[in-house]
Image: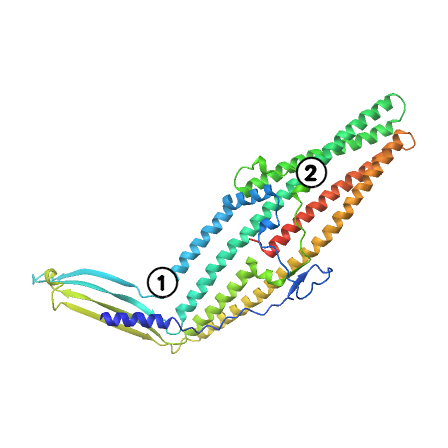
Amino acid sequence: MTRSLISIAILAILSGCTSLAPQYERPASVVQAEINNGYAPVANANQELQPYTQWEQLFTEPALQNLIRTALANNRDYRVAALNIEKVRAQYQINQASRWPTIGLNAGSNVQGKTSGNSNINRQYSATVGLTSYEIDLFGRIKSLNDAAMAQYLGSQAAQQSLRLSLIAEVANAYYNLAADQANFKRVSATLASREQSHALIERRFAAGIIGELDVQQSKIALETARSDRARYQALIVQDQNALRVLLGSELPVTDLPTDFALATANPVLPSQLKSEVLLRRPDVQQAELALQAANANIGAARAAFFPSITLTANTGFASNSLSNLFQSGSGMWLFAPQLNLPIFDGGRNQANLDIANAERDIALANYDKAIQTAFREVSDGLTQASSDQDRVKAQQAQVAAAQRAFDIAQARYQKGVAAYLEVLESQRSLYLAEQTFNTLKLQQAQNLVNVYKATALY
């Protein structure tokens, strides 16, 4: 009997080498080999394009890096994703165990007698070791199911990576929003102080009869507008800080708050072109490919259902009417019960299951192609936007300088009495809007960097 069990084990190992699943090959790419910003010169074919490989290479500000690391350590959603991976891993191990025989030790006794007429009592004792209902995987059905379970497990890991990307991106966006609102608050506070001084001067000139009430009221409008904007940005700063606290899962360290908007958004310049191979590291693309692999493996399981299956039950041990003689010579016993299941007629169930498996494989293939195309578009859009943002920020910076010069000239003309105060207000408003637009463009530039980070999947 021992030799039989060994033979069964060898047969189990050899049977696992067979699979009716189609040979998996990664689908051909449905996008071009290189991604560029749409109008930059195409690089030489021999040029080596080196993409960034880690999020620290894009988000270089130390305070932001500290916040991201804190979020990865404390965020509740990210913890749940990690625990879900452990759950799926355990499920895969359960599926993997089905490839091997379940061998156990059984011991028991059976006592039987009649309630009347005969006082004889029959006793039977046994102790056996063996395997129960083990299916020999002749046509790879169990192997295909295990391959599908492995793909699902790896897919859960990709889902965690997707959440990691989103978490890092959300922290970066919240940080940039806070930095921008702080910069706007600082700017409007300076504007408010300047307008308070100007309004006080205008009121004195009005009291002296030098100017009329119109200048006073125009100055008052500009003053209260700045005061209202200051209150708005003050509230936005608190909201930005609250958003960061939720993402971090802890209190917001004062030392990691942005102190300078220009420093916070001083990130590296993105390349104008990348190889489309970077798309394959995106977790959504990986999930799509793993779903395709799982669907491919399920075809093998559906095909195997058309073929016979063999289930084995076997044990060996001792049996005796007396417990004291249970392990004596002559009490040995064994059992070997193979069972063959051959599908003959099932009303088309197996064929329908195979059709479903093939359809699911085709759906998974379409989803994979769509994921690749979506990833390509997002990266291309990000690179194009990066080039556009760089040009717009440079132009807006020149506009701020021109607006500042115009305001200085208007103020000097008003003080000399050769211009109306309305000219000062208009030039001041233009400067205010130019500075605000500059900060908005810098924020958009930083947010686009976050979008490119997510699109290229830097872990």
Viewer-proximal residue among 106 and 164: 164
In the rendered image, which quarter contains the N terminus? bottom left
Say few, some or many: other residues with alpha carbon within 10 Å of mark 1 (under 14 / 14 to 19 / 20 or more).
Answer: few
Disc 1 marks which residue? 97
Seen at 36% across and 66% down, the residue is 99
Whole-angstrom CA distance, mark 1 to mark 2, is 59 Å
Q: Which of the two marks, 1 or 2, is nearer to us in this view?
A: 2
Find residue 107 and report its horizontal and vertical position in percent.
20, 60
**What residue is rendered at 45% in x and 51% in y?**
83
Q: Secondary structure at mark 1?
A: helix
Query: Relative to residue 288, is residue 227 drawn left or right?
Result: right
Along the horizontal axis of the image, is 229 left or right of 83?
right
**Amino acid type shown at disc 1:** Ala
Q: Amino acid at mark 2?
A: Ala
The correct choice, above or below, for 342 with respect to 294 in the image is below
Q: Position of residue 290 (x, y in %)?
A: 51, 63
Residue at which label 2 appears: 183
Query: Does residue 246 appear in this view?
Result: yes
